[in-house]
Image (tube, rainbow, N blue to C red):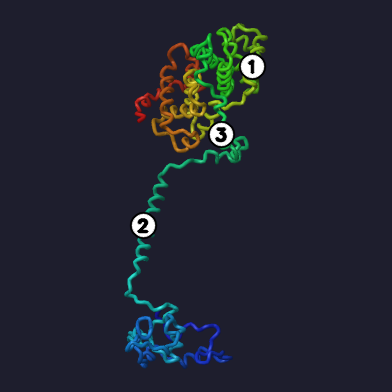
C-alpha cells in the first residue's frame, strides 16, 4: 500500500520510542511528525553490514555478528522498522533500492519478508492439485445426484390427516410384511382335499365376485373372504356339496369384520337358491371360527394394494386396472404361491405397463414395496395371460364386473403383451 507521511496510523496509547514512557499531555502526533525522517533519506545514510534477504547478517570471513539484536531474526514490520532506525540497525539491501519518488514508499504492515522468487513447496503444490481434483469430483457427483431418481415422501401431504397415521404408518407396513406369512396359504393344500379341486375353487370365487358386486360391499371384504376360504380349506377337508356353504359363511364373517351394514342370513340363503337352511349357515359359521381360532385380522393383498398405489402416485385409471388384475389373480389357484404383498406389487406393475409401457416402476415403488422390476416380471407375465383370457370361458365374473361404467370399463384395456417378449436374462 502506498501512503504518505501524514496518514500513517498512530496507536491510541502512544509510547516514547527512545524511552518507552508515556508522552503525558503533549500532542504525540505533532512531535512524531517533527522528529520523523523520510524512510528514503534514512536508507541513503545507512551503510555497513551485508544482509541477506531475510534481514540477517551474512557471515563475513566465516563469522556471524553475535551482537546483532534479536529484532534481526524477527519479521521486519512497521514497528520493528522504527526501532531499528532509532538503534542504528541496518536495513536489508532491498530497502536501499531507490524508489520512484522520495515521497512515496511501501510500508510493511506486519508481513514477514519472503523471497518472492521462491517456488511453492512441492507438498503444497500436490495438496492444491488434490483439492482441485476433489472439488471437481464433488461437482460431478452433485450433477449426477440432480438427475438421479430419488425416493419421494408419499406421506408428507397427509401430515394433518389423523386417519393416515403418518407417525407410524411405516412401522405398520413393516409389521404387515412380517405377519403376511401367517395368513398366507400353501399352494399345495388342495392335495389333502378328496372331493374338491382347484377348478371348483375357481368357480366358487368367481361366483362370490358377482355376489360381492351385487351387494355393493367394500373392496377389502372380498379379499378377506377369499383368504378365509383358503385358510379353512387348508385345515379342514370338505365335501363338494358343502363348498358353496363355506363360501357364503366366509363372506358373512368378512362382512361382520369389515362392513358397517352386514347382509342378513336370510339374504345369503336366498342367493344360494335355498340350498342351505339358516341353521346350517350358523353351524358352519361356528365351525369355521373355531377352526381358524377366531383369527380374522390378517394382512391381505388389499392392505398392500392401497399403500403401493400411493407409492405409485396412481390416478383413477391405474387404480381400477390394478384391482381388476389382482381380482383375476384371486380366482386362480396357482397364484397362491406368491405372498400377498408380492401379488399386489405385481398387479400394479402390470397395470402400469398396460397403461404407460415399461420403465414405470420407480425408485419410490421399489422402496415401499421391497421388490424390483426384475423380481416382478415373472408374476406379471402370468397376470398378462389372465388378462388375455378374462373375457373367454365360463369364469367371466371379474371381467363382467370391471366392464361396467362404474369401473370405467377397466376390463377393456389391451393386455401388455410386450411383457411376454422381455428377456429376463
User: Which residue is at a point 41% across and 44% down the rendered structure image?
Assistant: 148
Front label number (1 vs 2) = 2
Give how far across and how far down residue 144 sits, in percent.
39, 47
**198, 13: nearer the viewer:** 198
Q: CA distance from mark 1 to mark 2?
A: 73 Å
Q: Quadrant of residue 74?
A: bottom left
Which quadrant of the figure contains the C terminus? top left
Q: Secondary structure at mark 2?
A: helix
Compared across the picture, whether 219 is left or right of 365 comes to right
Instruction: Say which residue label 1 marks.
Output: 263
Give how far across and how far down residue 289 sits, in percent.
64, 18
Compared across the picture, whether 212 is left or right of 3 comes to right
User: Which residue is at a point 34% across and 86% down the rendered structure image?
Assistant: 59
Q: CA distance from mark 2 to mark 3?
A: 44 Å
Mark earlier in primary sequence (1, 3): 3
Q: Is residue 383 above or below residue 51?
A: above
**Labelled pair 1, 2 in contact (Cβ < 8 Å):** no
Give how far across and how far down residue 47 sits, in percent.
35, 92
Q: CA distance from mark 1 to mark 3?
A: 31 Å
Mark earlier in primary sequence (2, 3): 2
**71, 204: nearer the viewer:** 71
Q: Secondary structure at mark 3?
A: helix
Q: Residues within 10 Å of mark 2 (few under 14, many from 20)?
A: few
Give how far across and how far down residue 196 sits, in percent.
52, 10
Which quadrant of the figure contains the N terminus? bottom left
Instruction: Say which residue label 2 marks.
Output: 133
Compared across the picture, whether 112 is left or right of 208 comes to left
User: Which residue is at a point 62% across and 7% down the rendered structure image?
Assistant: 276
Q: Is residue 41 above or below residue 149?
A: below
Q: Residues within 10 Å of mark 1 (few under 14, many from 20)?
A: some
Please identify the residue farthest to the front as the structure is shown.
62
Check residue 173 in the rendering and tell me which mark sits there, or answer none: 3
Amino acid at each position: 500500500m502506498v501512503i504518505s507521511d501524514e496518514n500513517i496510523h498512530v496507536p491510541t496509547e502512544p509510547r516514547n520510542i527512545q524511552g518507552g514512557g508515556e508522552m503525558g499531555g503533549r500532542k504525540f502526533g505533532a512531535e512524531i511528525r517533527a522528529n520523523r525522517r523520510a524512510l528514503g533519506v534514512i536508507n541513503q545514510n545507512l551503510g555497513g553490514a551485508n544482509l541477506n534477504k531475510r534481514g540477517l547478517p551474512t557471515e563475513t570471513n566465516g563469522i556471524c555478528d553475535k551482537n546483532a539484536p534479536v529484532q534481526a531474526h524477527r519479521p521486519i514490520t512497521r514497528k520493528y522498522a522504527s526501532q531499528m532506525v532509532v538503534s542504528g540497525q541496518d536495513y536489508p539491501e532491498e530497502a536501499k533500492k531507490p524508489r520512484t519518488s522520495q515521497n512515496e514508499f511501501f510500508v510493511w504492515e506486519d508481513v514477514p519478508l519472503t523471497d518472492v522468487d521462491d517456488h511453492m513447496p512441492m507438498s503444497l503444490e500436490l495438496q492444491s492439485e488434490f483439492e482441485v481434483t476433489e472439488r471437481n469430483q464433488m461437482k460431478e457427483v452433485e450433477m449426477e445426484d440432480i438427475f438421479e431418481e430419488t425416493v419421494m415422501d408419499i406421506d408428507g401431504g397427509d401430515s394433518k390427516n389423523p386417519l393416515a397415521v403418518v407417525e407410524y404408518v411405516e412401522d405398520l407396513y413393516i409389521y404387515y410384511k412380517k405377519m403376511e406369512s401367517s395368513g398366507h396359504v400353501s399352494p399345495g393344500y388342495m392335495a389333502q382335499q378328496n372331493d374338491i379341486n382347484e377348478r371348483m375353487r375357481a368357480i366358487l370365487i368367481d361366483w362370490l365376485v358377482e355376489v360381492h358386486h351385487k351387494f355393493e360391499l367394500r373392496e377389502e371384504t372380498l379379499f378377506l373372504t377369499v383368504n378365509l376360504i383358503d385358510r379353512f380349506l387348508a385345515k379342514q377337508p370338505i365335501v363338494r356339496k358343502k363348498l358353496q356353504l363355506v363360501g357364503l359363511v366366509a363372506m358373512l364373517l368378512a362382512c361382520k369384520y369389515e362392513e358397517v351394514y352386514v347382509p342378513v342370513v336370510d339374504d345369503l340363503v336366498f342367493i344360494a337358491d335355498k340350498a342351505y337352511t339358516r341353521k346350517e349357515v350358523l353351524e358352519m359359521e361356528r365351525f369355521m371360527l373355531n377352526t381358524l381360532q377366531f383369527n380374522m385380522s390378517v394382512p391381505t393383498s388389499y392392505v398392500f394394494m392401497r399403500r403401493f398405489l400411493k407409492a405409485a402416485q396412481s390416478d383413477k385409471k391405474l387404480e381400477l386396472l390394478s384391482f381388476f388384475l389382482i381380482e383375476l389373480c384371486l380366482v386362480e389357484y396357482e397364484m397362491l404361491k406368491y405372498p400377498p404383498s408380492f401379488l399386489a406389487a405385481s398387479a400394479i406393475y402390470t397395470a402400469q405397463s398396460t397403461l404407460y409401457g415399461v420403465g414405470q416402476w420407480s425408485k419410490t415403488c421399489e422402496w415401499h414395496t421391497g421388490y424390483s422390476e426384475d423380481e416382478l416380471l415373472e408374476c406379471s407375465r402370468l397376470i398378462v395371460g389372465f388378462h388375455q383370457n378374462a373375457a373367454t370361458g365360463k369364469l367371466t365374473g371379474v371381467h363382467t364386473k370391471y366392464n361396467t361404467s362404474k369401473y370405467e370399463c377397466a376390463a377393456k384395456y389391451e393386455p401388455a403383451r410386450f411383457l411376454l417378449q422381455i428377456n429376463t436374462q
